[in-house]
Image: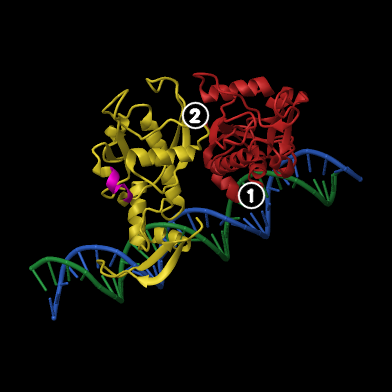
Chain colours: A yellow, B red, C green, D blue
DNA sequence: GTCAATTAGCGCAAAAATGAGCTAATTCGA
DNA sequence: TCGAATTAGCTCATTTTTGCGCTAATTGAC
């Protein structure tokens, strides 16, 4: 989420095949390495991101999708708070691209990465339709307006204020406190339920 | 679906490691082979099943899950009509195990196959909650009772007759004909919408 | 031929969900 | 200080969904 829009993080290929082009971060799997460990290693090395729990998405297996030879990609997806990308984005080789505002950039990604992004967006939209901020992007505590703004950005459409509130409130824990210093009527503050 | 119960097809390992044990059918991926092609080859060779379109499930990557060494399994799932398994089941090395009636058999599967089965059941339950017989198990045309019986077997619970009918009718194509020779009041006959 | 059993179709009351308007409580700019 | 702007909470009318009972239409056993 950058500037209120769902975005995908791309890295610029440093060397070798297609040097200079932008693509999704990736890495080869080391022997006996768990896929999730490989994903975390890749995020740390290429984008300076740590402490995440990416979820497995889909295996992309077109034998012609990579000029370097036959590889299969086990795509993963994660929602990462913008704040966690600060140091990564300071680098010239890392950037965010809005999924909805820059669809042509996404469409031009090599290695079938556009399909991967589409799949990831779909998966996140489903997850966000079912639970409050499952990607834990919001700093706690937050208001329902904060939550709804985030969910509208992920969904890519406006959500009905009261319908949204009724659906989410039972899935949140009230803090008993009210927002302060924000524009408009003060709002109740919420945190996520633990263990989820 | 065997005897009205959701079942998983197992094969008996013919040779090598764990010979004689029952497990999910599997195969090694050949170079440059599409995963879906490998799945189809495996089903044909080990269970005599053809003409299916299995869907990708999840990659299981525990490095210790296979005594033979480090392998990753890209699990797939498919719903197969019992009739299509006739010749396969004639073999001593192929059997069906009910997911709900024989949970302990499923739990004892080697190679983490129990997790794979659980994942597959969950995925099929979601698919069946959203569309009429997406696995195309029912011979067309069928009655709503036929459909509901199938969906109840997949869901593992009773479904409300009228609620189910209202949800499914808009997603089906009426044939204009009525059932005949069946017990009880004759029912309208349906077929699936094409292109799905 | 009759009646029990089974299954279907539908109407309707009840329950649940939705959307919007109204009042309330703030902040911010003039 | 006041009023516009913004946001929240809630009520209520409306809409939608659900569950069930009643009637209907068959088959099968006796």
Q: Quadrant of residue B151?
A: top right
In the picture of the structure, the residue carrying the numbered disc 2 is: B195
Kindly state the secondary structure of the residue where label 2 is placed: loop
For residue B89, say whether it is visible: yes
Task: Give the CA distance from mark 2 to mark 1.
Answer: 27 Å
The magenta region covers: A84-88
Identify the disc placed on residue B58.
none
Q: Earlier in the sequence, mark 2 or mark 1?
A: 1
Q: Residue at x 44, y 42 (%)?
A: A123
Disc 2 residue crowd, few under 14, some 14–19, many 20+, Cα 10 Å: few
For residue B51, say whether it is visible: no
The percent position of residue B108, horizontal first and vertical second, equals 71, 40
The chain under label 1 reads: B
The answer to whether A19 appears left or right of A57 in the picture is left
Kindly state the secondary structure of the residue where label 1 is placed: loop
Q: Residue at x 73, y 40 (%)?
A: B105
The answer to whether A180 appears left or right of B179 in the picture is left
Q: Is residue A87 one of those drawn in magenta?
A: yes
The answer to whether A114 appears left or right of B167 in the picture is left
The percent position of residue A122, horizontal first and vertical second, equals 42, 41
In the picture of the structure, the residue carrying the numbered disc 1 is: B159
The percent position of residue B170, horizontal first and vertical second, equals 52, 41
The answer to whether A19 appears left or right of A171 in the picture is left
Q: Tag count in the figure? A: 2
The chain under label 2 reads: B
Q: Is residue A121 one of those drawn in magenta?
A: no
């Amino acid at each position: 989420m950058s500037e209120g829009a769902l975005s995908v993080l791309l890295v610029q290929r440093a060397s070798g095949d297609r040097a200079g082009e932008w693509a999704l971060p990736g890495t080869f799997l080391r022997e006996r390495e768990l896929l999730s460990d490989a994903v975390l290693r890749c995020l740390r090395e290429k984008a300076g991101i740590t402490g995440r729990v990416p979820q497995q998405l889909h295996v992309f297996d077109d034998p012609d999708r990579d000029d370097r030879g036959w590889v299969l990609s086990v795509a993963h997806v994660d929602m990462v708070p913008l704040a966690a990308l600060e140091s990564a984005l300071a680098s010239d080789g890392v950037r965010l691209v809005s999924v909805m505002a820059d669809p042509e950039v996404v469409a031009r990604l090599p290695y079938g990465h556009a399909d991967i992004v589409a799949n990831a967006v779909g998966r996140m939209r489903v997850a966000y339709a079912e639970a409050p901020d499952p990607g834990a992007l919001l700093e706690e505590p937050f208001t329902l307006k904060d939550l709804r703004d985030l969910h509208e950005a992920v969904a890519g459409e406006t959500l009905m204020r009261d319908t949204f509130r009724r659906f989410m409130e039972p899935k949140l824990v009230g803090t008993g406190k009210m927002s302060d210093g924000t524009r408009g009527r003060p709002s109740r503050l919420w945190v996520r339920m633990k263990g989820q």
